[in-house]
Image (cartoon, coloured by chain):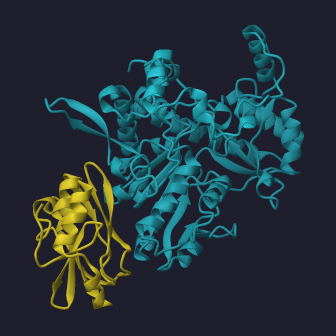
Amino acid sequence: MKLDAKAKYQDTHEWARREGDLIVVGITDFAQESLSDVVFVELPEVGAVLEKGEIFGVVESVKAASDLYIPMSGEIVETNVTLEDEPELVNSDPFGEGWMIKLQPSDPKQWDDLLSGDEYEQVAQAEE
Amino acid sequence: MTYVANTTADQQAMLEAIGVEAVETLFNVVPEAARFPRLNLPRPLSEMEALAELARMAEANVDAHHYLWFLGAGAYNHFVPSVVPQLQMRSEFYTAYTPYQPEASQGTLQAIFEYQSMLAELTGMAVVNASHYDGATALAEAAIMSVNAARGNRPKILVSPNVHPQYREVMRTYLQGTPFTVTGDENPAHDLDALKEMLDEKTACLIVQSPNFFGELEAVDRLAEAVHAAGALFIMHIDPISLGLFKPPSHYGADIVTGEGQSLGNNLNFGGPYLGIFATTQKLIRKMPGRVVGQTTDTNGRRGYVLTLSTREQHIRREKATSNICTNQGLVALGAAIYLAAMGKQGLRRVAELCYHKAHYTAAEIDKLNGYAVINQRPFFKEFVVRCPKPALKIAQQLNQQKILPGYVLSRRFPDRPHDLLVCVTEMNSKAQIDRLVTALSEAA
């Protein structure tokens, strides 16, 4: 299972990464592997304000549809519109081109509560 | 698909596997008194006695074969070609269950696919689902879909007062306990302009039925522009037979189209089972409730049919499913597909023309009678409203004595309209029948 050293994680298989003041969010390599071919990603509207743990979208694969949970509270400032036509990027590059949203965190301290790469790896292995 | 028996040996093997002595043990959680309660039933009947009893009960019903039938209001007496029941009742279709396993259900899947394709052509819409329970539930689902498409940010559902009153009731039943409100139909005089005024940033959709409950074609031209400008969806409920003659709802910019499909090759059936038609645009396909059959190819490149987009469905995402009662009326939808295939384009157009011309002949003849007036202000299709010289209920009762059902007495739903009768004429009504109706109305005045 691939991990991103710069990212932090959530036990619902989302990753979060700092980019300046913003937080970029996507789903992990383990998550895309479990889902198999992603066929559709439903993303929130720019400007939406969500609380940590709220659903920000849905990822649909040939096997299942799963909700996406936001790892930190904040306002959505950008979404990856490329995924509308190329949802397969979530499979091919989950930590890069397959990113889903950028948010302006309202409570940056929530970053500290997220899982480290090692902690997440244990969570994922337990699920395998 | 082969029938798999459940033998005593099978049961024994299963019980051993789960470590239970007897099947009865599995029901221990049900209080003993409720397990096999004594039912206070009359003595059992032989088949011969039962059939005689059922025949006696059936004889007590009034039906369209024995009465002159001018009753519509949502359930229509159209001709059903004999090819429809003949094919519909084949056991391969008749006993089939939900086609979750495509490798064992190609026939059922293809039949639904054909239904979807023909309805897509008829409505002009990009996608049609495998059907809903009936027209009313299809419309309620459309309202819910419009709210979901707006992610709950638009809680207001605008509906015209000319939409079938029972459909509006079903919609309100569906929306019980949700933060969404149905409005716009409180005042029966609310026309489309008044509804347009009510559009705002909280409106999820505007719902119009055309032909409406009173048989009239609504002035829906350019209405979609106003609805879309407010950021809402435009929902049209249609009569599929009327589409043989009039422009499809796609032409008027509808985002969701619903309809009652009973007219298409299915009998009145005492009010059910019926068929909920549901269609939408490519853009909204993932918001659509119900199931969709798609056409694909197998690994050898051969054509095959499967349930598609089913990851959103109730059997996979139970608590997240848009609809948990999207009963697929497969057999009735099959009847509709056979009917449309048998009729063809020209046939359907002919049925629609006959309905239109016979209804207009009937309306003109009734309008000539002393004391009677046809009060429709707009063009109508196969139904129209007659204002009678005395309470419509009295007139209907008088005509019932002569085995005529002259129409739907509007005071049943609209107490302030005691003199109004909603008359329906289809291709099934001969000129002789129509003339008898007119004479009977004249005598009853």
Q: Chain B is drawn in which colour?
A: cyan
Residue B334 is situated, as x and y percent measured from the top left of the image, at: 45, 31
x 42%, y 29%: residue: B17
Q: In this view, does B440 lie above or below B225?
A: above
Q: Nearer the viewer, residue B25 or B76?
A: B25
Q: Nearer the viewer, residue B116 or B309?
A: B309
Q: Nearer the viewer, residue A55 or B344?
A: A55
Q: In this view, does B201 lie above or below B89?
A: below
Residue B284 is situated, as x and y percent measured from the top left of the image, at: 35, 59
Residue B393 is situated, as x and y percent measured from the top left of the image, at: 85, 46
User: Quick one: quadrant of the N terminus of chain B?
Assistant: top left
x 16%, y 77%: residue: A7
Q: Chain A is drawn in which colour?
A: yellow
Q: Is residue A75 visible?
A: yes
User: Quick one: quadrant of the C terminus of chain B?
Assistant: top right
x 32%, y 49%: residue: B309
| Residue B37 falls in image quadrant | top right
